[in-house]
Amino acid sequence: MADPATAPRDLPAELSLARLALRNRSVYWGGLLLCIIVVVAIVGPYFTAEPSALNPTNRLKPPGPNGVFGTDMLGRDLFSRVINGARVSLVVGLAVAVIAVSIGLFLGLIAGYIRVMDALIMRVMDGLMSIPAILLAIALISLSGATLTTVVIAIVIPEIPRVVRLVRAVVLTVREEPYVEAAISVGTRVPTIMARHVLPNTIAPLIVQATYICGSAMLTEAILGFLGAGIPPEIPSWGNIMSEGRTFFQLTPWIIFFPGLALAATVLAVNIVGDGLRDTLDPRIARNMR
Amino acid sequence: MSVLEIENLSVSLPKGADRKFAIEDITLSVGRGEIVCVVGESGSGKSVTAFSVMGLADRRALTPVAGEIRLEGENLLEASDAHLRSLRGEKMAMIFQEPMTALNPVLRVGDQIAEMLEIHETLSASERRARVIAAMQDVRLPDPEKMYGSYPHQLSGGQRQRIMIAMALVLEPVLLIADEPTTALDVTTQAQILKLIKDIQTRKGMGVLFITHDFGVVAEIADRVAVMQNGRIVEQGEAGAVLGAPSHPYTQMLIGAVPSMTPPERQPATGKIALETRGLGKTYGSPGLFGTGRTVHAAQAVNLTVRRGETLGIVGESGSGKSTVARCVMRLIDPTSGEILINDENIATMREGRLRAHRRDIQIVFQDPYRSLNPRRTVGQSIVEGPMNFGIGRDEARGRAEELMRVVGLAPDALERFPHQFSGGQRQRICIARALAMEPVILIADEAVSALDVSVQAQVLDLLDDVRKRFDLAMLFITHDLRVAAQICDRIMVMNQGEVVESGPTAAVYANPQQDYTKALLAAAPGHHARFA
Amino acid sequence: MLRYVLLRILSTIPVMVIVALFVFLMLRLAPGDPAAVIAGDYATAEDVARIREQLGLSDPIVVQFFRWVGSLMQGDLGISIFSGKPVSELIAQRIEPTLMLALTTITFAVLVAVPLGTLAAFKAGSWIDRFVMLFSVGGFSIPVFVLGYILIYIFSMTLKILPVQGYRSPFTDGLGPFLLHIALPSVTLSVIFIALISRMTRASVIEVLEEDYIRTARAKGQSEYNILIHHALRNAAVPVVTVIGIGIALLIGGVVVTESVFNIPGLGRLVLDAVLARDYPIIQGLILFFSFIYIVINLLIDLSYTLFDPRIRY
């Protein structure tokens, strides 16, 4: 019976997929907010004061005439620092998402298609997943020295298992599809089958997963900065600003609140886009992975 | 007096559907002690009718816009939700197509029957249990005391459907609605369940509204029959009259498309042997570390030969191993024992590298037309994929694909379109074209027409038979449907639980089955004794 | 059944070996001489030599690994470089606050999230549903320490009804002070769990409500409320329990941050102090310890599936 509810949704082309996604309200508004943040992060630093400029006579001032967000304990302009911090967060989020998805995709395809590698890769991933991400990142960074690169690597590593599991699950489902068996029957070689019939099915769930990874990477970066284990303190990242604000929190809570708000808004925008994409693209597997 | 009267009922479909009404202006009644079959193809509105009566259709999507549904004279469309709930189970009950999913997997089956009593009656726990046991005895379930505590997954398909029937009938409703209750069952189980429904109906005198797509089932069980097409009833009347002398052209076409159980006389094939298996076997599972592991013999010692120009049918119920054989021969799974000979070469243990050259010779058409084509690739891309794997140029492959489109009865411009723009039957034609593009010697049809409506099924069967003749193919035809097998197969092989039970020329096996299992199978085919117009 | 449990327990061994290998290699493969890294920037040559000797770093790497695993098997997690105490002893001293924080958080989160998610699923599309989903996406977006400071600002600094920070033991200080001190950290940490669990509960219940047996229950005349309670919840349980298990990893990360914000002297603080002091045996030991906990909890959760679904039989 041709029951429309159980018949698989046909996705003729990826292009119309993007158009479909934009019609979703969450994707639209989340995307808009994210665009604004990105533009501010790119353009903002050209219009704000030097974020590291010290002003010892003007320390710990509340928001007002001495700066929209006030100043920190060294008299630096908080507004300028928050605007400049956006770049760090976005770069980390994007880099982690791209790298984790690329590595995870590669390993997931191997695990899903080559049986001997499956057990090995999945055991390693299980092991990696059982190490708490933040601890792992802290340990990696403290061992190899804190730079932007090591922070990104330290956040990427614990994110990989989730991507591998997702890709592997898609591969295992798709390889049972009759159209893949038909491709085997007409003599299509395994690498071609992977590229032509399996890979396209991973794109939609991976896009969704990538947005979630991007959001969680920005949070992790901030947490690492806040704990004093993140990128070097001279870079004005949101985590570092908040870390510096801890000492005087009872006196000047805004030093934590403003960057915290900026971070939350950015991650929220990313997550809303992710939710919207998930609802539109409906990769069931992605939903179960979260 | 009628138990159920449906009068001028119309149910609208949501905006954007391919038609305005799911069912339009239908009038139908079910009397006490009567079985009325509503028969139609997919999308005819037969299930919507059943669900509308029960009030289980989603009213936002399927809104009744005109007419009445009266249960013992009371209009259900005006009843409150609470009142409707009290009628469901008590006065009208329903059984469904798939008993596995219709039962809650985490609750004991006895308790699921007892729930009916909890909802509608106040009984003590022991009285309830006694009533449940009695109901289970009523549907002839073995050892009800013990089965009470079983979970659905521990029962067979037939037992599960009996549980559903016991549940539906425990409160002795006046109306039973059965929505394709035997479609998901094997043919022998189907025969038993049909008999059970008929028996209980006679004993209790309730009215039954029976939804089906299968004219064999209609012939088996119906007192009266209503034929639906595109949401309308095109013909209704006494079962014998409608089946024997249909008046509406659609009914005539449908009944004409039902394959006959009598195989035509066929000349034995004399072509060269194209495919042979010797002692083919497939065992799942491993003996385990301590010899305690479970093994399943999906197929054992299967010997078969297929000549060019010949169709060999493998028939059997689910779990018989018929598809395992097909998939082994295709080398989609690796056989655990035996030989598969194609062109005098054994491909059973051949490595993929060498096997690839042989893949051209043997092609397959799968059951599910919706999953057999990659939805992201055009029909043309799917068809030329194979030939291009073997070094044929794009233009040449393309030209041949256009030719094949004509062979399978589609326009050549279909190559530019995506699978979702085609119906199920058209997709099966595309899959046949894809197989033919490889210029195979052997074509395997694995339940290739089972998912199709009967009218489409007949056309695709004709096409398969046609291409077999035209290209002198050796065809291996896997099916559970004895009617289909009778019409297309030169020889058949009956399988049960992984083993070949009987084989021979189709006409001989049908006329004079030697083994008990084959006899039972043939006797169970619904409407096997009925003559269709 | 027993056989399966044994097999399942055995199957955690390779995972634990991989964790151990990873932790072991992390230090060995880090750029530079591990002894020098451990000794820190201001160490003398003697310090480095002493540490190398202490950790047995001059032996072949395979020997080092097996010796290390051997001592792990005896429960020996190593010796802290700075305090000279066994790591297991340090963990034992600091475990209570962390355990209490984790327990209160999980309990609170499950008690809030499961009903919330169920309600959202039951009223899918309604304002309640939208609120739950909004809360959930918000919970995933706000950094745990920012939330902690916001709560401190509101409840401790403005309303002055809860202490700013610190920890009181329920065993030595009494239940009242314990609850007062644990309330804010617990709520802070549970927000992300409530987000996670309520979202999974909602998705799972929605999926179950579309199953055929729910339609059967309707055909019996069962009320929607009873359908939800008797038919839907138990069927929806497995994914929810699974996500709680996966969330344990999240919880452990959250503990480190929360303890830091609320100045709770637990294992999280031990980690941070160890990082600042570059006391690697402690870091190693704690990573192993937490991974072990994670693996054991997920093992238990796996085994608990039989309680919810009779189809899963071992």
Image (cartoon, rainbow, N blue to C red):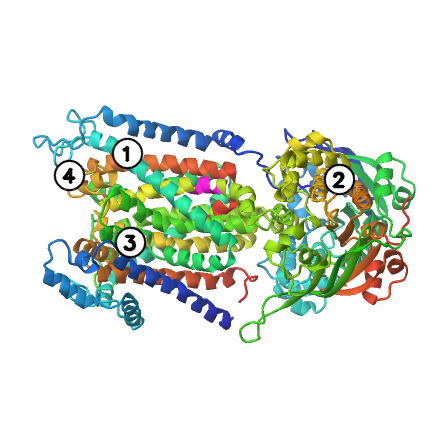
The reply to whether callout 4 and callout 3 are in contact (CB within 8 Å) is no
Mark toward the viewer: 3 or 2: 3
Tell me: residue B464, above or below residue B169.
above
* Dot 3: element: helix
Which mark, by number, is residue A264? Answer: none
- Residue bearing the label numbered 4: A251
Q: Earlier in the sequence, mark 1 or mark 4?
A: 1
Q: CA distance from mark 3 to mark 2?
A: 68 Å
Q: Name which residue type carries label 3.
A: Leu
Q: Are marks 1 and 3 in contact (CB under 8 Å)?
A: no
Q: Which mark is residue A135?
A: 3
Q: Amino acid type of disc 2?
A: Arg
**Mark 3 packing: few (<14 Cα in 10 Å), some, or many (20+)?**
many
Q: Is residue C300 left or right of residue B464?
A: left
The residue wearing badge 1 is A86
Q: Main secondary structure of the magenta part?
A: helix
Query: Which residue is at a point 70% across and 69% down the rendered structure image?
Result: B143
- Helix, strand or loop at label 4? It is loop
| Callout 2 touching callout 1 (CB < 8 Å) | no
Q: Is residue C233 visible?
A: yes
